[in-house]
Amino acid sequence: MSVIAEIIDTLENKIEKLFTKINSLEKKSQDLKIELTKSATIIRTQSQEIEALKAKYETLKVANALLGSEDNKRETKLKINSLIREIDYCIAQLSD
């Protein structure tokens, strides 16, 4: 009978260790989910900042070219032509 009791005690100890390990892994999983959520938020914020900075950079390039910079002259001319075409289209729509 004592052999069976020892086997049961061993099994109980192993089951207790398994439950402890499960709880530990669940806690770690929860922590990682929180960290992942925070990281995703940071990535979203940084992506928005990058897009805003790209827009500002493009605006500055156009403004710099309008001030006489030779670096982006072609791009500025293309942008102005595009804007003129849009204005012409709007005028045509209004006159119809």
Image: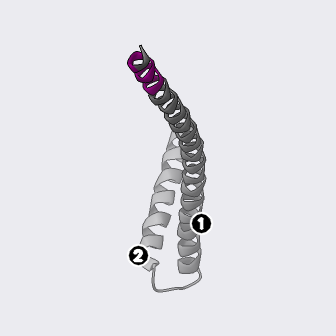
| Cβ–Cβ under 8 Å for marks 2 and 1 | no
Q: Type of residue at label 2? A: Arg
Q: Is residue 6 in the magenta section?
A: yes
Return the mark for residue 88: none
Say which of 78 and 43 sits in front. 43
Q: Residue at x 41, y 13 (%)?
A: 1
| Element type at mark 1 | helix
User: Where residue 90 sits: x, y (%)?
Assistant: 54, 45
72 lies above or below 25: below
Residue 95 visible: no
Q: Which residue is mark 2?
A: 74
Q: Few, some or many C-alpha atoms within 10 Å of disc 2 (few <14, some 14-19, many ≥20)?
A: few
| Element type at mark 2 | helix
Q: Few, some or many C-alpha atoms within 10 Å of disc 1 (few <14, some 14-19, many ≥20)?
A: few
User: Where residue 22 sits: x, y (%)?
Assistant: 50, 32
- Of all residues, the one furthest to the front in this rendering is 1
Span of residues in magenta? 3-11
User: Where residue 24 sits: x, y (%)?
Assistant: 55, 38
60 lies above or below 96: below
Residue 74 visible: yes
User: Where residue 13 sits: x, y (%)?
Assistant: 49, 29
Q: Residue at x 59, y 82 (%)?
A: 67
Report which quarter residue 47 is drawn in.
bottom right
Q: Is residue 10 in the magenta section?
A: yes
The residues bearing labels 2 and 1 have C-alpha atoms spaced at a distance of: 19 Å
What kind of secondary structure does the magenta stretch mostly adopt? helix
Q: Which residue is mark 1?
A: 56
Q: How many marks?
A: 2
